[in-house]
Image (cartoon, rainbow, N blue to C red):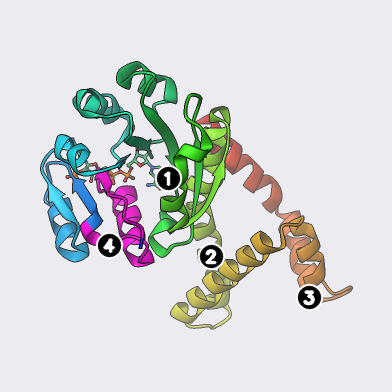
């Protein structure tokens, strides 16, 4: 088990999913994780379920942790940074999972000597199948961030990207779980139309999507090759592909991702 002390400021949908994933991964124990939350009872309730250390200020999180995750809504990030700035040492790493602000704001408030990373996870981190895009700048070196990679690799895959692609990564991996949910729901609706019970339809559709995604990731090749393998000449699957193309599925997906990026 990793011994690094992890701090989390903000345990909502994303912070909570990360904490659950870290504990379920067994790479981290609940005792290693210190969390501060907002004004509601939500974090206290989560602490009862997950067993992490609940504290009442960001300052206490910083005092207890080597890696500090900031998982509050973007507009709160500068306030949190101003609060923790005088308490941070150069050995600690600040990881913002907020969609914004950019690294420049962190440097401005925390100073150039601090280790700062932006990471964009997605909600499947809760089931150890997350995708986290990570960016950082000099003077931070990739080798200094072993703890950060270990943390996000305990709950899924990681990809280092340049900061100018973070909004694209956010749409592609952060928002797309919602798009895939629509796809699963629509596939299941069709099966229900044909008489399949709804709960079975959801199980079949989501397992098929999960398996196809796993195969595409593992094969590391153009997904078109995998598609072609399923399409027997003159068969049923190619008839379905024809219908998808006729109804603009490819274009709908491209436009959805671009609209998401452009709304950042
Ligand atoms: N959801 C996603 O799929 C996703 C993906 C990638 C990145 N993100 C990023 O993750 C961040 C959080 O998003 P979210 O979806 O998790 O939002 P959320 O569910 O609203 O969670 C935000 C949490 O911050 C807490 N909070 C408020 N003030 C605080 C303070 N002063 N100190 C500590 N905690 C405080 C809130 O507590 P109360 O509940 O008590 O008010 C709430 O639990 C955002 O910046 C977002 O861009 C989200």
Q: Nearer the viewer, mark 4 or mark 2?
A: 4
Q: Nearer the viewer, mark 1 or mark 2?
A: 1
Q: Quadrant of ligand 1?
A: top left
Q: Position of residue 104 (x, y in %)?
A: 43, 20
Q: Could you tell me which secondary element the residue under label 4 belongs to?
A: loop
How crowded pointer 3 is (Cα within 10 Å; few <14, some 14-19, many 20+) is rated as few
Q: Could you tell me which secondary element the residue under label 1 belongs to?
A: helix
The residue to which callout 2 is attached is 184
Disc 1/disc 2 C-alpha distance (Å): 32 Å
Disc 3/disc 2 C-alpha distance (Å): 20 Å
Q: Which residues, given as a range, are shown in magenta? A: 2-31
**Ligand 1 within 8 A of label 2's CB?**
no
> Picture quarter containing residue 231?
bottom right
The residue to which callout 4 is attached is 29
Q: Residue at x 34, y 49 (%)?
A: 14
Disc 3/disc 1 C-alpha distance (Å): 46 Å
Q: Nearer the viewer, mark 3 or mark 1?
A: 1
> Picture quarter containing residue 230?
bottom right
Disc 4/disc 2 C-alpha distance (Å): 34 Å
| Above/below status of 193 relative to 263 | below
Give me the disc on residue 148: 1
Q: Position of residue 34 (x, y in %)?
A: 20, 49
Q: Residue at x 36, y 58 (%)?
A: 2
């Amino acid at each position: 088990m990793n011994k690094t002390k992890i701090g989390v400021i903000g345990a909502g949908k994303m912070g909570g999913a990360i904490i659950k994933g870290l504990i379920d991964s067994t790479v981290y124990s609940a005792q290693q994780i210190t969390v501060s939350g907002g004004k509601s009872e939500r974090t206290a309730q989560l602490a009862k379920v997950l067993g992490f250390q609940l504290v009442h200020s960001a300052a206490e999180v910083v005092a207890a942790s080597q890696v500090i995750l900031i998982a509050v809504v973007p507009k709160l990030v500068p306030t949190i940074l101003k609060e923790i700035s005088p308490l941070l040492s150069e050995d600690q790493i600040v990881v913002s999972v907020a969609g914004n602000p950019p690294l420049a704001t962190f440097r401005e408030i925390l100073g150039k000597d601090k280790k700062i990373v932006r990471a964009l996870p997605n909600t499947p981190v809760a089931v150890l199948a997350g995708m986290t895009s990570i960016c950082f700048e000099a003077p931070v070196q990739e080798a200094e961030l072993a703890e950060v990679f270990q943390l996000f690799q305990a709950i899924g895959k990681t990809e280092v990207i340049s900061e100018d692609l973070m909004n694209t990564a956010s749409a592609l991996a952060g928002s797309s779980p919602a798009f895939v949910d629509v796809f699963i729901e629509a596939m299941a609706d069709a099966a229900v139309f044909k008489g399949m019970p709804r709960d079975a339809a959801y199980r079949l559709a989501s397992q098929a999507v999960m398996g196809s995604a796993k195969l595409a990731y593992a094969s590391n090749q153009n997904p078109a090759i995998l598609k072609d393998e399923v399409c027997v000449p003159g068969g049923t699957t190619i008839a379905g592909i024809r219908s998808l193309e006729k109804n603009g599925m490819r274009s709908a997906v491209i436009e959805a991702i671009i609209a998401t990026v452009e709304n950042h």
